[in-house]
Amino acid sequence: MTSRSCFSREVPQVPHLLPRRKGGLSGEILDLRLDVDKAFECFEQFLDVYLQVEDEELPVSAGPAILNFSGSGVAAAVDPLIPGRVNVVIPGALAGGNGNIQEIIPHSLFPAGVPIGVVEAGRTVEKVLLEVLESFDTPTQVTVGDDVAQARFMTVFDSNVRRAESYLAESGFRYTASTVVKLFFVDSPNPPTRGVLRVIVYFS
């Protein structure tokens, strides 16, 4: 077994220095390369289980060191699309401070308006980030807003869901009443058969 870095399998610049025989310079070089690869392997095993993430003392991912998220509205969960990533959602429902709401939206929810979360009265939406985690296979367009103004924060010209990139739109709109912010699909001739979005709404 070798490390994921496969250091011991790297090809030397001068091949004749590394014949598999005992003694001499070639033996020392080969031994050093194998030792370094073993060190990489041990380090990688250590990193794989280094941190245990908990949400309200309930394990999310295992490890010897514990990072616990607690408090009303705080949620931690393993990302279903990106192995090794733990998403922490802090809605910011308490008075004061900044916060965000976010949602992962698969293509299967087309063409409905998809709730991202509630922005409380008195909060100001600072910016909206749309990440195309998996590109869509039809010329679908999306907006981000609310039932009163469906493109209040993002218009169809602010993103391209057929490209796996991130798109940012700044705002500054202040809600005077608690409002559900949504992502809206704009009709396309054919419903998409693939595609995943993540929408994050930041507010203060």
Image: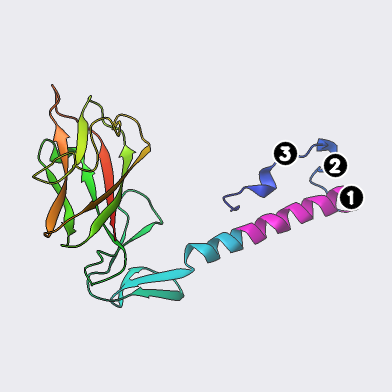
Q: Is residue 38 left or right of residue 76?
A: right
How many marks on residues?
3
The residue identified by callout 3 is 11
Q: Please state the horizontal and vertical placement of residue 138, each as a whole percent of the image.
A: 22, 25
Q: CA distance from mark 3 to mark 1?
A: 17 Å
Classify mark 1: residues with Cα within 10 Å, few (<14), some (14-19) or many (20+): few
Q: Which residue appears farthest toward the top when viewing the image?
A: 189
Q: Is residue 25 magenta?
A: yes
Does label 3 or label 2 sit earlier along the sequence? 3
Q: Please state the horizontal and vertical placement of residue 91, each as a whole percent of the image.
A: 24, 64
Secondary structure under the numbered disc 1 in the rendered image: helix
Q: Which residue appears farthest toward the right when viewing the image?
A: 24
Q: Is residue 135 magenta?
A: no
Does label 3 or label 1 sit earlier along the sequence? 3
Q: CA distance from mark 2 to mark 1?
A: 7 Å
Magenta segment's dominant SS is helix
Q: CA distance from mark 3 to mark 2?
A: 11 Å
The residue identified by callout 1 is 25
Marks 3 and 2 in Cβ contact (< 8 Å): no
Rendered position, 20 above or below 91: above
Q: Please state the horizontal and vertical placement of residue 181, each as a whole percent of the image.
A: 16, 50
Q: Quadrant of the C terminus?
A: bottom left
Marks 3 and 1 in Cβ contact (< 8 Å): no
> In the image, which residues are magenta?
23-40
Rendered position, 107 above or below 63: above
The residue identified by callout 2 is 17
Give 99 or 70, whichever is nearer the viewer. Answer: 99
Classify mark 3: residues with Cα within 10 Å, few (<14), some (14-19) or many (20+): few
Q: Amino acid at mark 1?
A: Leu
Secondary structure under the numbered disc 3 in the rendered image: loop
Q: Amino acid at mark 3?
A: Val
